[in-house]
Amino acid sequence: MRVVVLRLGSSTSDPLQAIRKRLTATFPETTCTLSQQVMPLPKEAYNSRRQQYNAPNILTRIRDFTNDFDFDRVLGVASADLYASRLNFVFGQAECPGKVAVISLCRLKPEFYGHRSDRALFDDRCAKESVHETGHTLGLPHCRDPSCVMSFSNSIQMVDTKDCNFCETCRIEVLRRIPRVYTQNVTH
């Protein structure tokens, strides 16, 4: 599986290497690339009353922006706070199944909750949400096992409690659903 990580708006590039490494390590037969392009956050996705961006709108824009990209999956990474209908916020969202996903770094930062900066904790949270949303692109639903990376998180405590790996049931599903890499025989 070929995954590209796409920076959205003015998001920091700091956690992108940690995200890339985690996706490559977690998903078998996966290559993960950091896009040199940056996609602007769509103005029409911004809700000034909420001071947040609409995640489903951003997914549509990512799909349009990356239509010519030669990748199986695209993970957008934004610093902006995201929401979806009937939810106060989302850590991320994905097409399930589909090609595109997005995560927000905003509420993954310890500073958002009044805590001091903690790079290791921030990178761990980013990795979990990246794996979670990429799992959704493969069609994986939320898992009932609270330690599984595919469990639903509606608070930062739930993100911190779950592991960065799949439970055995979800791992088997990933192996079943992941696009296989086929190599072409080359004659020298």
Image (tube, rainbow, N blue to C red):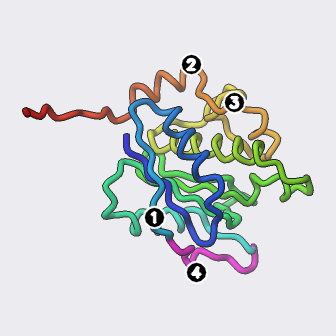
**Callout 2: few (<14), some (14-19), or many (20+) C-alpha neighbours within 10 Å?**
few
Q: Which residue is mark 1?
A: 36
Q: Nearer the viewer, residue 149 or 144?
A: 149
Q: Amino acid at mark 1?
A: Gln
Left-right relation of 77 to 120: left
Q: Is residue 85 above or below residue 157?
A: below
**Callout 1: few (<14), some (14-19), or many (20+) C-alpha neighbours within 10 Å?**
few
Report if residue 42 lies within the magenta region.
Answer: yes
Q: Which residue is mark 3?
A: 163
Q: Residue at x 58, y 80 (%)?
A: 43
Label 3 sits on a secondary structure element that is loop
Q: Residue at x 65, y 57 (%)?
A: 14
| Separation (CA) of disc 1 from disc 3 | 30 Å
Quarter of the image with the C terminus in it: top left
Q: Earlier in the sequence, mark 1 or mark 2?
A: 1
Q: Earlier in the sequence, mark 1 or mark 3?
A: 1
Name the mark nearer the viewer: 4 or 3: 3
Q: Position of residue 36 (x, y in %)?
A: 45, 64
Q: Which residue is mark 4?
A: 43
Q: Amino acid at mark 3?
A: Asp
Label 2 sits on a secondary structure element that is helix
Name the mark nearer the viewer: 3 or 2: 3
Q: Which residues are magenta?
A: 39-50
| Separation (CA) of disc 3 from disc 2 | 12 Å
Q: Which residue sits furthest front?
A: 188
Q: Which residue is mark 2?
A: 168
Q: Earlier in the sequence, mark 4 or mark 1?
A: 1
Label 4 sits on a secondary structure element that is helix
